[in-house]
Image (cartoon, grey):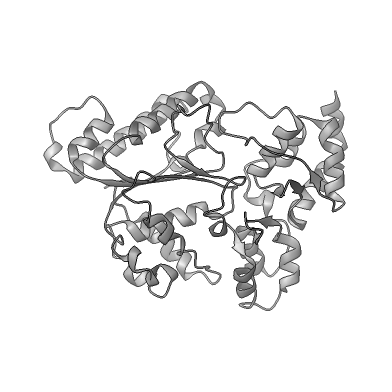
Amino acid sequence: MAVFLNTDAAYQDFQMLRNDEFFTDKTGMIEKISRKINTKNRFICITKPRRFGKTSILNMLGAYYGKSCCSKALFDGLQASRCEACERHRNQYDVIKISFNELSWKGKEYSDYIGRFQKMLEQDIREAYPALCGREFDSLPDLITASGGRFLFLIDEWDYIFSQENCREYHDDFLELLRDLLKDRPYVVFAYMTGVLPVKQYSTGSALNMFDEYTMLNDAYFDEYFGFTQQETEQLCQKQSKLSMSEISEWYDGYVTDEGKRLYNPRSVVMALGRGKCQSYWTRTGRMDEVLYFLKYNIVEVRDDVIKMVNGQSVKTDIWREYTAGQEPPSSRKEIYAAMIIYGMLSYHERELRIPNQELMLEFQKALEDNEFWQQGIK
């Protein structure tokens, strides 16, 4: 049974999302993606905060492009079904879907983790292409090349190993593995990669420099698909009667597209509408208390700014560099803010930093009230 190649996992996930009461049609993104298939611009990396719908979009793409299931009925009536140019791509590709955070970490050694991944992908390819049986190859890319197939890659949580403390020394090895698997390989018709942290770009010779990156600081092309727009949120509010649009706006609005359009935290909006209650859903879906983690690195300069923002003011600053995968913990004021923007804790538009909404405001207030934390940090 295949693990990565042509499974129905993406189809099943998107089908469940499609059935949800608060489903929002983001399939218009398929038209933009389809333009890049089989072109030089076929490598896309989307890095957004958790809870912003990255995995849902990835599964949507898998359901649409993958040949494992006929998805015409699933997309009927949605935006993608009205795009004739997209139709020629629907269910036409062998899809390799990899979610690095879902792979077993049994043994807790990088070599075991990556070894299992390579072995399982090799088995999938050999099962799909029986002519490879009995033949030996020097590398996994050589095997895939020999298959003669052409594949669409969907890679979720690409930066997962960067959150594993025992993998620091293997960061470069992992980047090289992805580069070797994807870069300049004729079998790649398209590669779509998601994560929280942008790829660390040392220079034009960086391992994954073939990817066009779309981040919280640099995305004027796909930004409206990661978050709910004002219109989408208003339409969702009409499906229930417990919460008003003004309440939802106060709690979960606050992010802005490159064009200045409002964006709402999608995960929190759905949770609030489903439960009929506005509250902070931030810490319940995060892996750690990120606010405290970043504030502790530079207490003196940052705390005054945070107090201003908690009081509803914005802070003027220029953020030129993004916080990226493999980077050392932030040590300067701007590095801390760059990290907070990437993680979705602050919004940044036209050189102004703000706490996006009431949900995040509560997290910052908790941090400021933690006297024991601040005293430890000052020491």
Q: Quadrant of the C terminus?
A: top right
Q: Residue 29 appears at what percent x and percent y?
A: 46, 60
Measured from the top left, where is residue 84 in percent x and y?
A: 33, 69
Taking the image as shown, residue 240 lies to the left or right of residue 45, namely right
Front in this rendered view, residue 196 or 334: 334
Q: Quadrant of residue 71?
A: bottom left
| On screen, residue 229 above or below 348 | below
Q: Residue at x 39, y 60 (%)?
A: 12
Name which residue lies at 68% across and 70% down.
276
Residue at the image position 58 percent from the left and 54 percent from the top: 52
Q: Is residue 177 left or right of residue 24?
A: left
* Residue 289 visible in the displayed image: no
Residue farthest to the top, as pictured: 169
Left or right for 126, reference 158: left
Report x, y in % for residue 138. 23, 24
Left or right: residue 268 compared with residue 305: left
Q: Is residue 213 above or below residue 142?
A: below
Q: Which residue is nearer to you in this view: 173 or 370? A: 173
- Residue 207 percent coordinates (x, y): 44, 29
User: In the picture shown, does residue 184 fall above or below 205?
Assistant: below
224 shown above or below 219: below
Q: Nearer the viewer, residue 118 or 29?
A: 29
Q: Residue at x 31, y 56 (%)?
A: 66
Q: Is residue 361 visible?
A: yes
- Identify the image quadrant of residue 205: top left
